[in-house]
Amino acid sequence: MNKNEISRDNYILYAVTDRRWLNGRKLSDAVESAIRGGAGMVQLREKNLDDETFLEEALKLKSVCARYKVPLIINDNVAVALKADADGVHVGQSDLDAADVRGLIGPDKILGVSAHSLDEALLAVKHGADYLGVGAAFATGSKTDVNVISHGIYSEICSNVEIPVVAIGGIDADNIAELKGSGISGAAVISAVFAADDIEAAARKLKVRIAEAIA
């Protein structure tokens, strides 16, 4: 998908994969369930796979996402993203420089950048980011090396950038309402969807709650 084909609605429920929560289920099946439940974007996040296996997973998910016209974003790995013809790349502050990534992926693919402050957000926009992943919103079990940010930072960033801001970190159907009025466009979730017994139902419920919080 060309990035011009997506809208802010795609960012409402942004599903980030983590196979630790799958309990033996196939990742492609889990992702399809999340999409059927309303996920408008999918990020393949694999910190411990070699590039060959990572690419195999990316190609499987690309097929699923393309069928539903949902963008597939690859976390960190530009080479895998390009080989799989993924729709975009997401990079953190300690990964490749966002401006360099934009140069590698070209103007038409989606570039997401993690930010934890207004300064980082503004620099990411300057370097060509299409959206920001901002967090951690709450304490999270998916990453142990993150700090929870003040919820006021969301309002500060959202009022100073024009691209979508996606909250991430420990978000679930019960706490997303705490970010109401902040200006975010959506929320990125991992365990709140992929750890659920019924992934599709969990995604559907969460999307409703997020939509209420960003209304």
Image (cartoon, grey):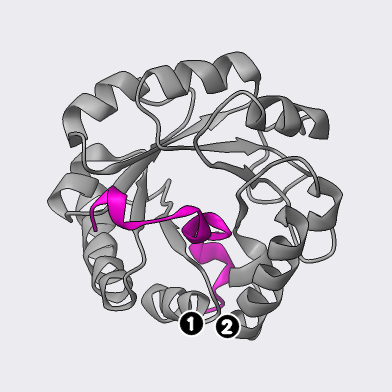
Along the horizontal axis of the image, is 49 left or right of 24?
left
Q: Which residue lies furthest to the left in this view?
A: 83
Along the horizontal axis of the image, is 120 left or right of 90?
right
10 Å crowding of disc 2: few (<14), some (14-19), many (20+): many
SS label for mark 2: helix
SS label for mark 1: helix
Residue 21, horizontal then vertical, whole percent:
59, 68
Residue range highlighted in magenta: 1-25
Point 36% across, 52% down: residue: 73
Residue 62 appears in the rendering? yes
Q: Nearer the viewer, residue 37 or 191?
A: 37
Q: Nearer the viewer, residue 201 or 146?
A: 201
Q: Which of 124 and 171 is in front in this view?
A: 124
Q: In this view, does 57 lie above or below 180?
A: below
The kind of residue on which mark 2 rests is: Glu
Which corner quadrant holds the N terminus? Answer: bottom left
Residue 147 appears in the rendering? no
10 Å crowding of disc 1: few (<14), some (14-19), many (20+): some
* Residue located beneath label 1 in the image: 36
The image quarter containing residue 97 is: top left
